[in-house]
Image (tube, rainbow, N blue to C red):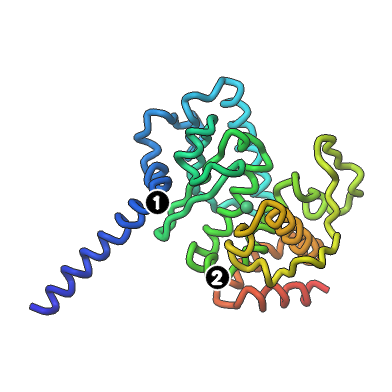
Amino acid sequence: MPANVFVRYGLLVLIALPIGFLLLNPQILRSVWIEKSGNFQAAQGMPNVYIGRSATPQQRSAFRTYVGQARNRIRRFWGSQQVRAILIYCPTQPDYEQYCAGGEGAGCSLGTPWGSAYLILGPDGNDVDVIAHELCHDELFVRLGWWRVKRQIPQWFNEGLALMVDYRYSHPAIWERPDQPETTFSRPDHEPTRPYTHHPMLKLSELETTRDFFGSDYNHTMLAYQIAADEVARWLSRVGRRNVPALTTAVASGESFRKAYQRIEKQSH
Ligand SMILES: [Zn+2]
């Protein structure tokens, strides 16, 4: 019967799509099977955290501390933490390349269209700023869904927001301690950031997609990070961090990102 055939083919497609997706993305397939991997161990007492067996005791203990601190930072920034991503720490570059295509950067986020999320931290990712940055991306995914983030959230906002909890690129006083002067914060190994610098070379409208943002060379990406951080710092210092979840709630209930972003800023005057 035609209806039966339709159901049968429909079912086949439903089964084939996720399998095809996993085969096309071997890094995601490995992440999905992390529990079964002999090279990784679940961190005791820390749900959803896996540490490469080649990590030294010092690396292990530092990683656990940084994950705890980063999760706290995310809770303070968003008001609560909804993230349920699985964190995978790869202490060596070869491990990292198995889980993060290209093995570039200190960390990367992987997601599936059906909602599973993995945060991969490489040898340079054993760092509270890197972990908080990646967790912030994931928080946005959880609150809006993969599809909505891909379709509606400009990459400059996604990155800019993550940079607000990544103190290599922004100043905690932007949202953590807005009443305190910036001089109370010092991090000798990092240049102090200048949140309001104006860069005329690139416009936000040229940083909408992942390709716009990362597609060019290293200098372009670094400039893109700075522009994204400047814009989100500007918005955040006007509206306050309470309006970050307010913005995602508005977008989740159907308001366009652009409208919600501008409306919240106007209302906060
Ligand atoms: Zn990022």
Query: Which numbered marker is on residue 221?
Result: none
Pick whichever of labels 1 and 2 is earlier in the sequence: 1
Q: In the rendered structure, which amino acid carries the disc numbered 1?
A: Asn
Residue 73 percent location from the top left of the image: 68, 45
Please tell me how crowded label 2 is: few (under 14), some (14-19), or many (20+) other residues with Cα within 10 Å.
Answer: some
Q: How many marks?
A: 2
Q: Is residue 81 left or right of residue 233?
A: left
Q: In the rendered structure, which amino acid carries the disc numbered 2?
A: Ala
- Tell whether label 2 touches label 1 (CB within 8 Å): no
Pick the residue in front: 146 or 214.
214
| 1 or 2: mark nearer the eye | 1
Disc 2: residue Cβ within 8 A of ligand 1's nearest atom: no
Please name the residue shown 85% across and 60% down the image: 196
Please name the residue shown 54% across and 30% down the image: 91
Query: Which numbered marker is on residue 25?
Result: 1
Q: CA distance from mark 1 to mark 2?
A: 28 Å
In the rendered image, which residue does mark 2 sit on? Answer: 252
Query: Which residue of the protein is positioned furthest toward the left in this rendering?
Result: 1
Please name the residue shown 63% across and 58% down the image: 216
Please tell me how crowded label 1 is: few (under 14), some (14-19), or many (20+) other residues with Cα within 10 Å.
Answer: some
Please name the residue shown 56% across and 21% down the image: 56
